[in-house]
Image (cartoon, grey):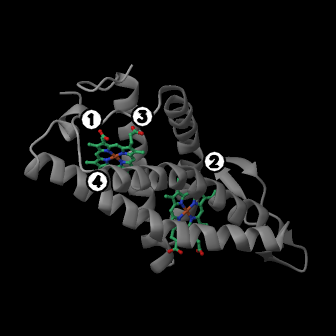
Amino acid sequence: MDTQTALSKQTIVLHWIVAIGMIVMLAVGVYMEENKAYELYPLHKSFGVLIVVFVLWRIYWRAKNGWPTPVRQYRPVEIKLSKIVHWLLIIGTILMPISGMMMSGLGGHGIPLFGLELVARNPDPADPSKVIALNETLAQAGKAMHGLGGNILIAAVLLHIAGALKHHMIDKDNTLKRMIGK
Ligand code: HEM
Ligand code: HEM
């Protein structure tokens, strides 16, 4: 169980698996999109599907345990801001993979999982180098969510890291230490 002085192993391990996974996925997503690095798409998709296991586990753990109690009393505005950012982060961690799967799966591009074909590509019989969407509207909605969601999540992560550093360096409290198990 999480307490005010120490976080459980499960909270710490899940936080860092999902945090590092999401940061790498955000960076790779932006890089591959900007540079048209199509060779990275299957890896991005595979890790994006894999991370869902940890994201769902983490959401279950949060729902069962509630949010960790702050290490000490803060100004109400700080508590509110950190709550908003934590919600954005946790919602972002589930909406990014879902929107990615909508865009790729329903867009007809297919979803690989490390060489396995989770959802098959749907080639256009007239020109097999192109694909036909299974549901164009939902695929486009997924694409829009993935792009906008990615930008919102990047902003939330930057705010979150700034908050963690403020606790550690300015407030000199235990917030960051507690999350690395000290
Ligand atoms: C786990 C979380 C994920 C994160 C954080 C993430 C993040 C991103 C980001 C930031 C971009 C660049 C978007 C842009 O600049 O418009 C991107 C692109 C992309 N992502 Fe993800 N992604 C995730 C999961 C997935 C999954 C599960 C799939 C598919 C199964 C997927 C498929 C794609 C594709 C195909 C693109 C390129 C879109 C294009 O070329 O228009 N992503 N991702
Ligand atoms: C270098 C990057 C990161 C650092 C230093 C960091 C640090 C921390 C710290 C110190 C806490 C504890 C806050 C408290 O006690 O109230 C925390 C909680 C949290 N972090 Fe991060 N974090 C990072 C990246 C991320 C990323 C990328 C995500 C998600 C996309 C994330 C999601 C969360 C969430 C949802 C919480 C609330 C508690 C929980 O669910 O475990 N963090 N983080």
- Location of the C terminus by quadrant is top left
Query: Which residue in the protein does label 3 denote?
Result: 14
174 shown above or below 143? above
Identify which residue, 14 or 59, lies in the foreground: 59
Confirm or reject: label 2 Cβ below 8 Å from ligand 1: no
Residues under labels 4 and 3: Cα distance? 24 Å
Among the two numbered marks 1 and 4 on one chain, the one whose residue lies closer to the N terminus: 4
Among the two numbered marks 2 and 1 on one chain, the one whose residue lies closer to the N terminus: 2
46 shown above or below 174? below
Looking at the image, which residue is at 59% across and 56% down? 95
Looking at the image, which residue is at 27% across and 35% down? 179
- Pointer 3 local density, CA inside 10 Å: few below 14, some 14–19, many at least 20: some
Quadrant in the rendering for residue 41? bottom right
Query: Which residue in the protein does label 4 denote?
Result: 78
Q: Position of residue 60 (x, y in %)?
A: 56, 31
Among the two numbered marks 2 and 3 on one chain, the one whose residue lies closer to the N terminus: 3
